Image: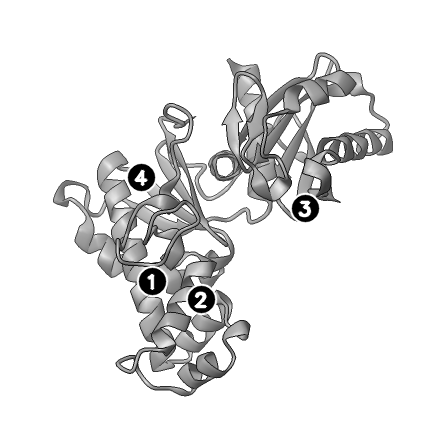
Amino acid sequence: MAEYIVGIDLGGTSAKLALFDRQLDKVGRWQVATNAKNGGQAIIPDLIASIQSELQEHKLASSDLIGIGMGTPGSIDRQAGSVQGAFNLGWAKAQDIRGAFQEVFPGVKVALENDANVAALGEHAKGAGKDYRHLLLVTLGTGIGGGLIVNDQLLVGAGNAGEIGHIQANPEGFLCTCGNRGCIETIASATGFRQTALARAKQEESPESSFKSFVQAHPDRIDAELIFEKARAKDAFAQAVVEECLTYLGRCLSQIANSVHPQCILLGGGVAQAGNYLIQGLKPAFEAGLYPGIKGSVEIKIASLGNDAGMIGAASLIQNDLKE
């Protein structure tokens, strides 16, 4: 009887994979470089070869595999098992992911989902969100993604629900990769913190400080981690940058909370490494924007699984399918 599930978190630089049992307890973990050259043609063959190697290492056969779940960038066709528009992977056109896996692993279940959604599923299954039926995960990385769970089920709407990074926070703001201006990911992602710092450094009305001078002199050395470090050290300019970015983020999160009323909002991704400082910074705007009827009923926490969330969530796609 097949007993194992592979969970894959596919990114533009690398793919993180893990082998799980039916209870989503990890048996093995490994990583594969993502080769996006030549239209990403080598990505799935590389993943397949690595899975075969891992199965051999554990003295398992393909028949021991229940399924493969994968979180990926791009637009997902869940029914067809395909992905397209994942430009950082070289996948502009539709890729038949399910067919490619099942050609090598016949009879194995294959499930695909958006990368932020699988992170939400992972936190809900094994992480900081496991005690909540209604949950929002916000990933604060290079961009901003979101995964929404309602009544213990992932909410995808007509297909692409959860793209919270493209809530327009400031119509006069920075140009976003989507073509609009002022999307929240242009302000409160790692990229957004950097853009805000560089823009504010050119403004005379911004607080003067040694860090402001450093930003002006070394714009290529500025990132969100450094901005938070200086803000914690009470640098006035860094504090002003953090306050601006987190005020916008708090307002956006309150709008989402007013719409779907999650019990908990989890913050993940690189920016969330700022921990409680991040939460305390966005809370004033968040609380101010909440509808009175839900005030005090929405918790904000830092996600707990880190890089494991996507792999666990991807594997849970298969586990959940077994339950149905």
- The residue at the point 66 percent across, 48 percent down is 13
What secondary structure is marked by label 3?
Answer: strand
- Point out the tag, 2 or 3, that comes first from the N-terminus: 3
- Point out the tag, 1 or 4, that comes first from the N-terminus: 1
The residue labelled by disc 3 is 14
- Point out the tag, 4 or 2, that comes first from the N-terminus: 2
Give the amino acid type for the residue marked by disc 3 in the picture: Ser
Is the Cβ of the residue at disc 2 closer than 8 Å to that at disc 3?
no
What secondary structure is marked by label 4?
Answer: loop
What secondary structure is marked by label 2?
Answer: helix
Give the amino acid type for the residue marked by disc 2 in the picture: Arg
- Point out the tag, 4 or 3, that comes first from the N-terminus: 3
Give the amino acid type for the residue marked by disc 4 in the picture: Gln
Image position of 157 with respect to 202: above or below: above
Checking the image for residue 194, the label placed there is 2
User: What is the C-alpha distance between the residues marked 4 and 2?
Assistant: 31 Å
The residue labelled by disc 4 is 263
Checking the image for residue 245, the label placed there is 1
Q: Position of residue 297 (x, y in %)?
A: 24, 43
Label 2 Cα neighbours within 10 Å, binned few <14 / some 14-19 / many ≥20: many
